[in-house]
Amino acid sequence: MRSFSIKSFGCRTNQAEAFQWAERFQSHGILLEEDSYQSDIVIINSCTITQRADADVRNFVRKISRRNPKARIIVTGCFAERDPLLFMNDPKVWKVFLNNEKDDLQREVIESFGKNKPVKHRPFRSRAPVKIQDGCDFKCTFCIIPKVRGKSRSESREKITDRVRGLVRKGYKEIVLTGIHLCLYGRDLEPESSLQELLSELVTIKDLKYIRLSSLDPRFLDKEFIDFITSNEKICSHFHFSLQHTSGRIIEKMGRKISSEKYREVLEYTRERSLDASLGADIIVGFPGESGKDFDHLYAFLEKSPLTYFHVFSYSPRPGTAAAGLKGVDSKTEKERSALLRELSRRKNLEFRKRFENAVLDGVVIKEKEKNLHVLTPNYLKVVVPDSGCRRSSLVRVRITGVKNQINEGMIF
């Protein structure tokens, strides 16, 4: 019997696609193998958002071909879309599928390796990511994603609701809604819908405990929507925003069409409505033309903001984007600025987590490792507790007994 593994790079949308493929392949008799160095088929769902992402994908292909030379390697995703010939001409790669050929990928794997009888299902993840939208209608000057993913396309509310119900029946307690631009959900549907309308349906599903949202665009967040997502107990109190920068001059050069004051209003209102929420953001450092004054504005904004963490990315020029030909900040300055923001993020996050020392919180078991369980709370606290026999996806209640620089320690309560 053949086995498969899937390695996803980049965004949660890739993870949601991989999750769905894993379910389908197992239903056709192909075994899930978590170790890519042991599986017969290795599917790589690639990312191309930065030069580092490209390098990670190429390195992984080389590692698989060296350590698992008999594996059939399939490459798909955004890097394959941007430069398909690179992989088509690579003798280590069996097949390449563009983003719009991912249904063909599934059929190819099932026809070549599948059997009619399903195998015992092994969960691909402890929480169920569900892709509700793909593509983006905007043209931020740094971003390659609209070129490789296309325009925004939404799944129907009926299809999403049916899928979530099915996942709940399988025992999943938390779903994670994903999309390339989640806030565009429903605008292309007939009749038109919205993310809030979809959420209004999903929260009524019996036995669904938590709904977690992936990245939200502050340009589309008004008080009504924030009131809704912060007042429903099923929607996790963890909100991640695509900020990128806060200097008005850099925001304009990025083509973002928003002010730092709007950012501030959204963040502060979200914190006002949800005092214990984890608030995160994506930040780009070193965009072409970023001056010391621009960076000082960014640092001061983040320091004073209610954000509890941020993901810091060094600017990476992407071929075919409007900013690709512009001269960026020198690498030494870029590294120094990135380090400053990452240290600020660590400090703010530690301060936030210390607020919950001795608190009792609900959560979902997301990992079993070395006689410990890793539990994720609705407000995005990862707590390591002694193994009590609970399995992945189980609902538990934990008391946080210690907060350290990197981890939170606790006990099943």
Image (cartoon, grey):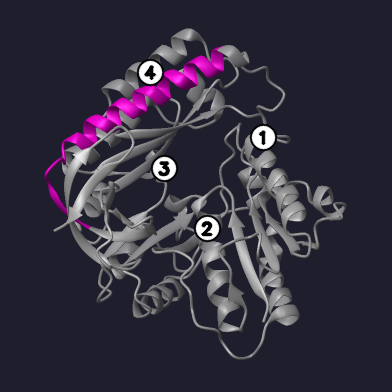
User: Which residue position is annotated with label 1?
Assistant: 51
| N-term-proximal mark, 2 vs 1 | 2
Q: Residues within 10 Å of mark 2 (few under 14, many from 20)?
A: many
| N-term-proximal mark, 4 vs 2 | 2
Alpha-carbon span between mark 1 and mark 3: 24 Å
* Element at label 1: helix
Pair 1/3: label in front: 1
* Residue 47 spot, x, y in % from top left: 63, 47
* Residue 242 spot, x, y in % from top left: 43, 38
The extreme front residue here reads: 371
Pair 4/3: label in front: 4
The residue range painted magenta reads 333-362
Q: Quadrant of residue 163?
A: bottom left
The answer to which of 165 and 89 lies nearer the viewer is 89
User: Which residue position is annotated with label 4?
Assistant: 299
Q: Quadrant of residue 260?
A: top left
Residue type at mark 4: give it: Tyr
User: Which residue position is annotated with label 3?
Assistant: 217
Q: Is residue 351 magenta?
A: yes
User: Which residue position is annotated with label 2?
Assistant: 15
285 displayed left or right of 231: right
* Residue 70 spot, x, y in % from top left: 78, 65
